[in-house]
Image (tube, rainbow, N blue to C red):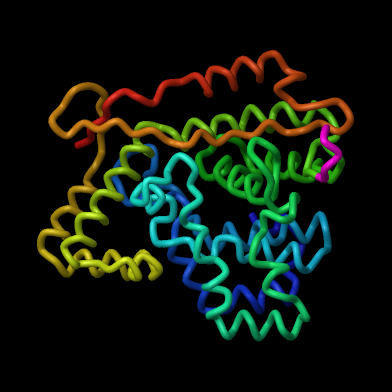
Amino acid sequence: MWEIYNPSIPDFICQLAETPAMQRLKDVGMHCGCEYTSFPLFTGLDKYSRYQHSVGCALIVWRFTQDIRQTIAALLHDIATPTFAHVIDFLNGDHLKQESTERDTVSIIEKSKEITAVLETLEVTLDEVADYHQYPIADNDSPRLSADRLEYTLSNMVNYHIAPMESVKLWYDSLIIGKNEEGEEELMFPNMETAEPFSKAALHTSYIYVADEDRFAMQTLAELLKKHIQRGVLGIADLHKTECEVITMLNRDEEARRDWRKFRALRHIHRGDHAEAKTVHSKKRYINPYVQGIGRVKDLSDTYALALNQFLASPLDEPLWGE
């Protein structure tokens, strides 16, 4: 996907991406542990890491802003992501907001002598890059379009075969920076011809993020990790290692290994009463892009408005159990 976002990778992105703190993200997946199960929804997916996502976000921001500080902020925005990513939000009880995994961003950047050395060379301060929320092209309030939201949406469209690469490239290439209804800068579409099909494809990814299999897998893995943290198999600090390292630690303990294998064997999801059934709510992610000069897609397309409202109204309170 990187070649779509920008024809080349600037040297300063490469320098920061090669630091140990960023390299760890190569073994922290974007699918939040779901890819380790045997649910058909997640089998056969291409590897998609937080590292790929982070570099992709940086390239998008660079393409549209040519601003080194905004680009670095986008690159580093997931540097504190723990193993299995948003599963840890479930563990922390923050899965409806999914913000708890961002808490250590500043300290991780500060503790990385490699990153701080590059920043010093570039004459960039920590305050300018430690919080990407200050840059609306990098991040903004949902359901607006930002580089972060755009990158994982386009990547998952391709990964889940929702849209072909040709359509993804067409939609991406049509994007511009403009002023939205509140006079703020935002990534947006110049017309409905590209905005509407993008929005409808993006809504397909929204359903995946709240699929029964996704919610059940994340909650189950969170419970597994919590159990074995309490047993002393893992420590809280171990959650900032790679997924391979954490899985290795689980497999060294007989009970943890048995639980991990049961998690990996999950293949079927069921709804209804069962001794192991659990109700799992989840954050509903979606995008309602702005079309330059005329408004949001939801207000311009009756079919998209209907589809989006159906998604937002879909219940997530039926008990689930897996085997």
In the rendered image, the quadrant that contains the C terminus is top left
150 w.r.t. 210: above or below: below
Looking at the image, can residue 29 be seen? yes
Task: Tell me where residue 205 appears, x and y as whole percent.
Answer: 54, 35
The image quadrant of residue 79 is: bottom right
> Most prominent secondary structure in the magenta stretch?
loop
Residue 112 included in the magenta stretch of the image: no
Task: Tell me where residue 128 appears, x and y as whole percent.
Answer: 73, 68
Part of the protein shown in magenta: 181-185
Task: Tell me where residue 137 appears, x and y as whole percent.
Answer: 75, 51
Looking at the image, can residue 4 be seen? no
Q: Residue at x 46, y 20 (%)?
A: 314
Residue ranking furthest to the left: 254
Q: Residue at x 81, y 31 (%)?
A: 291
Task: Tell me where residue 260 appears, x and y as whole percent.
Answer: 21, 55
Residue nearest the viewer, comparing 280 with 200: 280
